Image: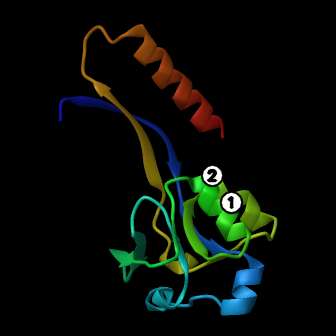
Amino acid sequence: SSLMAKPLSSRTHYVAASPSYVEKYGEPHTLSELNQHNCLIGNHNYWRFIEHGRERNIKVRGNLICNSGYALRDAALKGIGIVQLPDYYIEEDIHAGKLISFLDAHRESKEGIWALYPQNRHLSAKVRVLVDYLAEKLASS
C-alpha cells in the first residue's frame, strides 16, 4: 500500500451480558455454546476469538443487528442478549457489575487502532493536526 500508517491506540474485545440475562439463560462456557444464545450483532455476523493459539471466527445469531456500539451496549444492559464490544464501550460496566464478562480465555490480544493517510511529502496541515490530535487523545484514554 502507498498509505502511511500511524499507531494511535489499541482495543480489546469483551463478550458480556447483563446479570439478568445470565440468571435467565446462563452463560456460555465454550465457543460452541454461543449458538444457544441470543447474540447482539454489530457490523459482522461473526465474533473473533483465539482457540488453541489460533484465530477463530464464530458465526453468531441473534434478534438484533445494529451498527451502533452504544445501542448494542444498551441492549446488553437491558438483558436482551450477549454482546461482543471493544473495551471503550463496556469495560466500565464490567467493573461496575452491570455486565458480566465471559469466555475471557478466548479473548483476542489487543488490536491496534491506526490512522491511515496518503503518503505525501507535503501532508495537509488539516490531516497532520487531526492525526496528532487523535494520537494524543486516544493515548490518554
| Position of residue 139 in the picture relative to residue 21 (left or right) | left
Q: Nearer the viewer, residue 22 or 136?
A: 22
Mark 2, other Cα within 10 Å: few <14 / some 14–19 / many ≥20: few
Marking on residue 91: 1
The amino acid pointed to by label 2 is Tyr
Q: Residue furthest right?
A: 96
Q: Quadrant of residue 46?
A: bottom left
The amino acid pointed to by label 1 is Glu
Q: Quadrant of residue 80?
A: bottom right
Quadrant placement of the C terminus? top right
| Residue on which disc 2 sits | 88
Q: At 63% from the left edge and 53% from the top edge, which residue is drawn?
A: 70
Q: At 77% from the left edge and 65% from the top edge, which residue is drawn?
A: 95
Measuring from the top left, give residue 86's x and y in whole percent: 56, 57
Q: At 41% from the left edge and 17% from the top edge, which residue is drawn?
A: 127
Q: Are marks 1 and 2 in contact (CB under 8 Å)?
A: yes
Q: At 42% from the left edge and 58% from the top edge, which residue is drawn?
A: 43
Q: Nearer the viewer, residue 53 or 93?
A: 93
Measuring from the top left, give residue 23's x and y in whole percent: 75, 89
Measuring from the top left, give residue 28's x and y in whole percent: 57, 88
| Position of residue 136 in the picture relative to residue 116 (left or right) | right
Q: Nearer the viewer, residue 43 or 122?
A: 43
Mark 1–mark 2 distance (CA, rounded to whole Å)? 6 Å
